[in-house]
């Protein structure tokens, strides 16, 4: 509930800037398409998560919602990663070697997240009599494959997040040394602090997946997608 509240509050705060900087522009670009697609698929997914968490739904519906949530999270991960990589590519003055590295990382992430979202059958998530409201109390994991798939998916995201963070940090350190700006200013300007927070959130999400007794509990921890 907390992460969804923060997300909706952030949408309200930045809606005016989004309209002025994106929707009122006559020219459309790939960053615009990726940004708006990622922004609104995340919003719709969080609305679904609220229903998933607080409504009493039949087990069959919860299975379908779980599958959709996995696919939506997979798409959101990939598109968000592409946007982050485009920023890093620009920071390195469109370096060909950096571009190749980022493409390999994004393609690997896309493969891992797709496998994680689609590799297990729905029978691995078995409905049980609901003890309370919410799909996490209606479904239980009956196969270790579900946990492995989730860990692999978020592990791939963590590798990419750390790579983007380190590349941005290195460029920020170079700029900070060669300019009269403070290192803190450069880190904030280049997004180093943001990528650091994203990497930390990926670590937390991965730890939750590893230690929770029911992997479905972790589906409500959309830290990195927020």
Image (cartoon, rainbow, N blue to C red):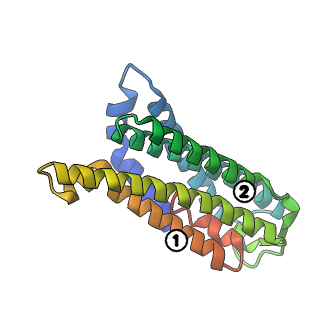
Most extreme residue toward the top, as rendered?
Answer: 26
> What element does badge 2 sit on?
helix
Front-most of residues 211 and 62: 211
Check if mark 1's residue and mark 2's residue have beta carbons within 8 Å: no
Residue marked by disc 2: 116
Residue 113 shown left or right of residue 30 in the figure = right
- Position of 100 relative to 165 (above/below): above
Front-most of residues 106 and 96: 96
Q: Separation of disc 1 and disc 2 at Cα?
A: 18 Å
Within 10 Å of disc 2 (Cα), the crowding (few <14, some 14-19, many 20+) is many
**Residue 146, horizontal then vertical, whole percent:** 77, 66
**Residue 29, horizontal then vertical, whole percent:** 45, 26
Residue marked by disc 1: 204
Residue 34 shows in the view: yes
Within 10 Å of disc 1 (Cα), the crowding (few <14, some 14-19, many 20+) is some
**Residue at 61% of width from left, 58% of height from top?**
156
**Residue 175, horizontal then vertical, whole percent:** 23, 49
In terms of sequence position, does the residue under pointer 1 or pointer 2 come before the other? 2
**Residue 16, horizontal then vertical, whole percent:** 33, 39
């Amino acid at each position: 509930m907390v992460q969804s509240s923060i997300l909706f509050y952030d949408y309200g705060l930045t809606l005016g800037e989004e309209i002025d900087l994106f929707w009122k522009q006559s020219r459309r670009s790939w960053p615009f398409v990726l940004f708006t697609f990622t922004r609104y698929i995340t919003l719709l997914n969080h609305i679904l998560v609220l229903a998933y968490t607080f409504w009493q739904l039949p087990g069959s519906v919860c299975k379908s919602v779980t599958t959709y949530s996995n696919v939506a999270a997979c798409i959101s991960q990939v598109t968000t990663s592409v946007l982050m990589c485009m920023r890093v590519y620009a920071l390195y003055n469109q370096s060909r070697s950096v571009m190749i590295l980022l493409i390999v990382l994004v393609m690997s992430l896309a493969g891992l997240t797709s496998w994680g979202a689609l590799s297990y059958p729905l029978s691995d998530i078995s409905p049980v009599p609901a003890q309370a409201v919410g799909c996490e109390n209606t479904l239980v994991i009956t196969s270790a494959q579900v946990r492995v798939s989730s860990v692999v998916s978020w592990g791939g995201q963590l590798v990419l997040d750390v790579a983007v963070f380190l590349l941005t940090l290195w460029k920020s350190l170079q700029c900070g040394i060669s300019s009269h700006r403070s290192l803190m200013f450069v880190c904030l300007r280049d997004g180093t602090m943001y990528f650091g927070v994203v990497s930390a959130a990926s670590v937390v999400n991965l730890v939750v997946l590893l230690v929770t007794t029911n992997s479905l509990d972790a589906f409500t921890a959309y830290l990195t997608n927020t």
